[in-house]
Image (cartoon, helix red, strand yellow):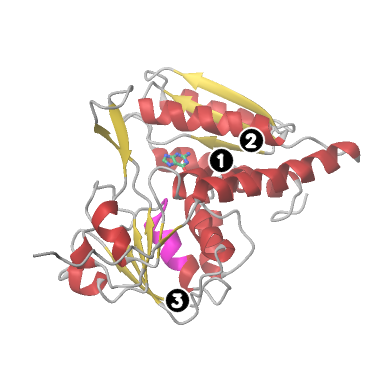
Amino acid sequence: MTTAPEAPATYRLIDGKQTAEDIKVEIAAEVAQRKAAGQKTPHLAAILVGHDGGSETYVRNKVLACERVGFDSTLLRYEDDITEAELLAKVEELNQDADIDGFIVQLPLPKHISSEKVIETIRPEKDVDGFHPMNIGRMVAGLPALLPATPSGIVELLRRYGLVTDGKHCVVIGRSNIVGTPVSILLAKNLEPGNCTVTLCHSRTRNLAEITRTADILVAALGRPGFVTADMVRPGAVVIDVGTTRVEDATKKAGWALKGDVNFEEVAPKASYITPVPGGVGPMTIAMLLLNTLRAAKGEVYPR
Ligand code: GUN
């Protein structure tokens, strides 16, 4: 007896790596124009505390990306034992430094330092992560703001792939300040892309799979590798995987591989569009950080 071959998967990959490259080329062209016109070179600074492997990689990639687009960049490194007062003083120095257009403090920070306090100390005009309550508040109110990079990267992917969001049901899993909460706000706005009906799910949500199965757009941002399985996804859904957990993988040189929150092998054949991990949302975060730095340098959100 022969069995019919399985229908070929018809999903399309959302290529965040290529899209981020396109955005970087656009930024580099604008920076070259600015330089030719005698305007200031945008300058991004990053503060990295300690030696967390993931944070080291992210910050290194952010600095490399600055070089790629012609920005100046400064990396300030401190050991785990820096005091909160010392770190706040460094933040204040960057606030006052006229050459620095924007800066980030890579999270997470050691337990003895309040990330809330650090974020609140950053001048909103230089908060290119979009984490300061002023930028969050302005985003919620629909005012011009420096928007958090990962959520705006997701919106930018939907825009550049021409995916219709108007009137669609978007289900977000995860309510973090960095991704879940802001992306749920942005996608509900009367914007294009936007105008979604949004359901924000989290660890206390009951009947999660019942809800996710009603999603036209499913955003997984909970940080649990392979959490979203095929039975949780409606056929034809757009699936955005924000997860980037390092899991042991003996076949890799580094001994680990990046795993998304979505079980790609079983979910992809059900999806219409899906982001891979790596190469999906991750590279977009850096591209949008660069875009925020350019906007800060231009005084686009907070006129100088
Ligand atoms: N840690 C994980 N993601 C981010 C980010 O986008 N910005 C900063 N500063 N820290 C992070």
Q: Disc 1 versus disc 2: distance between alpha carbons? A: 7 Å
Residue drawn at x 64%, y 62% is 144
Residue drawn at x 46%, y 34% is 106
Q: Answer with the quadrant where ligand 1 appears in the image.
A: top left
- Report x, y in % for residue 145: 61, 58
Q: Helix, strand, or loop for circle 1?
A: loop
Q: Is residue 230 magenta?
A: no
The residue type indicated by label 3 comes to Cys
Q: Tell me where the magenta segment starts and ends, as one range.
A: 178-185
* Sequence-first disc among 1 and 2: 2
Q: Which residue is mark 2?
A: 95
The residue type indicated by label 1 comes to Ile
Q: Nearer the viewer, residue 166 or 131?
A: 166
Q: Which residue is mark 3?
A: 196
- Report x, y in % for residue 294: 70, 45
Q: Nearer the viewer, residue 123 or 106?
A: 106
Total numbered circles = 3
Image disc number at residue 282:
none
From where the camera sits, is residue 173 visible? no
Marks 1,2: beta carbons within 8 A:
yes
Q: Within 10 Å of the Cα at label 1, are there few (<14), some (14-19), or many (20+) other Cα atoms?
A: many
The residue type indicated by label 2 comes to Asn
